[in-house]
Amino acid sequence: MNKIYNYIIIGSGIIGLAIARTLRKSEPTSKILIIDKEAKEAVHASGRNSGVLHAGFYYTADSFKAKFTVDGNKTLKEYCVEKNIPVNTCGKLVVAQNEEELTQLYELEKRGKCNGSNVKIIDETKAREIEPNVVTFKKALYSPDTASVNPVEVCAALKKDLLENDVEFIFNAKYLGQKNNTIQTTEGEFEAKKIINCAGLYADKIAWDFGFGKKYTLIPFKGLYLKYTKNKTDIKINIYPVPNLKNPFLGVHFTKTVTNEIKIGPTAIPAFWRENYEGLDNFSFKELLSTLSYEAKLFLTNAFGFRSLAFEEMQKYNKKYFVGLAQNMVRSIDPKGFTEYTKPGIRAQLLDKKKLALVQDFVVEGDKNSVHVLNAVSPAFTCAFPFSEFVVKKYI
């Protein structure tokens, strides 16, 4: 007779791992299985993100992102200290280029304070004391709690903890379908009382199989970073531009990694299929047709300014243009120092099919048999611990 699990979690990214951790704490004897189509954990978004622990000032107070980022920043730092995982507590400056952006800067400060984030507006002189290389127009927003970690190390530590607490993993198990809470995979069939879908780039498709998420589809956006291979001390803090608050992208910025390296990015280039990392990696003709169909609609209607976004982002394939966007935020940096791209990532961005609008927040749907975590995009990594507690408490 096949073993019946209490819970099967699809996806071993940060959200799947964090939900398993929360479940194990509350239910020490439950049978928990995590399946993943890859050979190890965190192969996609969780292992490819910037590693920045966000501070929670970008998001409106009514959102999950606002609710969980501040606490997520704190609890993930605490976990890293407990597990001897390095954390770079370098902070962040958000810089303005003109008077119009100052208004947005004050809006970010207002949101941050509403969300309990430790942020403040500082003048140009103070900004230069914090980061001598920075350029800003009159004011900047300072976030001392923004930090950087290695996301792969964090996910590996979580997996190790879970294995030590009798959570099972089956890798190379690609989801094929489900019937009556029995999951069909390339590694066989597995039955559970409850299925928890944390499948990232394929979470929407799996949700459809259970009757959820029908109003959404995923539109992939490719994130590229360029690494600076000259002097690591040229910049000592994360430097971000004022973003367009109508879209969920934060713009090209300087990231200080946990090893003190400097990189710029990311792009938000519309991709053509879900795992369109490089060349024809994981090419799917079916996904290509579906993605192009929606991207064509967005382009023709110019929904949420998609046309200008697409033109702007495609220009970032030009390295000189890409670097130039970052150069605007600093007094001096050698453009020839940006010599290599880091591993690309794909943002699992949901689109509301009827409204033709990007979904701004995390989405959770489910019933007594299954729960589906959709649109777990940035800052999902930062939010992972408190968000997983919310999902378990409310939906499981």
Image: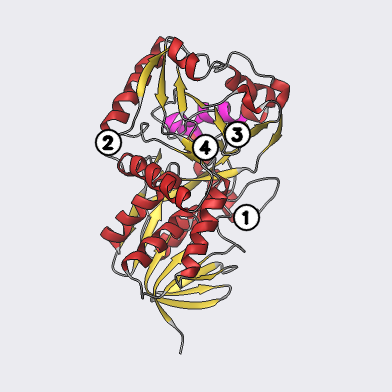
Query: Which mark identifies residue 284?
Result: 1
Amino acid on which disc 2 is placed: Ala
Looking at the rendered image, the quarter that the N terminus falls into is bottom left
Q: Is residue 375 visible?
A: no
Contact (CB < 8 A) between labels 4 and 3?
Answer: yes
- Residue 258's quadrant in the figure? top right
In front: mark 4 or mark 2? 4
**Residue 368 magenta:** no
Residues under labels 4 and 3: Cα distance? 8 Å
In front: mark 2 or mark 3? 3
Residues under labels 4 and 1: Cα distance? 38 Å
Tell me what residue is drawn at x 57 percent, y 75 percent.
187
- Residues in magenta, as a range: 299-314
Residues under labels 4 and 2: Cα distance? 27 Å
Q: Earlier in the sequence, mark 4 or mark 2?
A: 2
Q: Earlier in the sequence, mark 3 or mark 1?
A: 3
Query: Which mark identifies residue 260?
Result: 3
Percent x, y for residue 259?
A: 60, 38
Query: Which mark identifies residue 306?
Result: none
Tell me what residue is drawn at x 48 percent, y 63 percent.
161
Q: Which residue is mark 2?
A: 61
Residues under labels 2 and 3: Cα distance? 32 Å
Residues under labels 1 and 2: Cα distance? 38 Å
Amino acid on which disc 4 is placed: Asn
Q: Secondary structure at mark 4?
A: loop
Q: Earlier in the sequence, mark 2 or mark 3?
A: 2
Q: Residue furthest bottom?
A: 1
Vertical arrangement, residue 210 with respect to residue 84, above or below: below
Q: Earlier in the sequence, mark 4 or mark 3?
A: 4
Most common SS among magenta residues: helix
Query: Which mark identifies residue 88?
Result: 4
* Label 3, residues with CA under 10 Å away: few <14, some 14-19, many ≥20: some
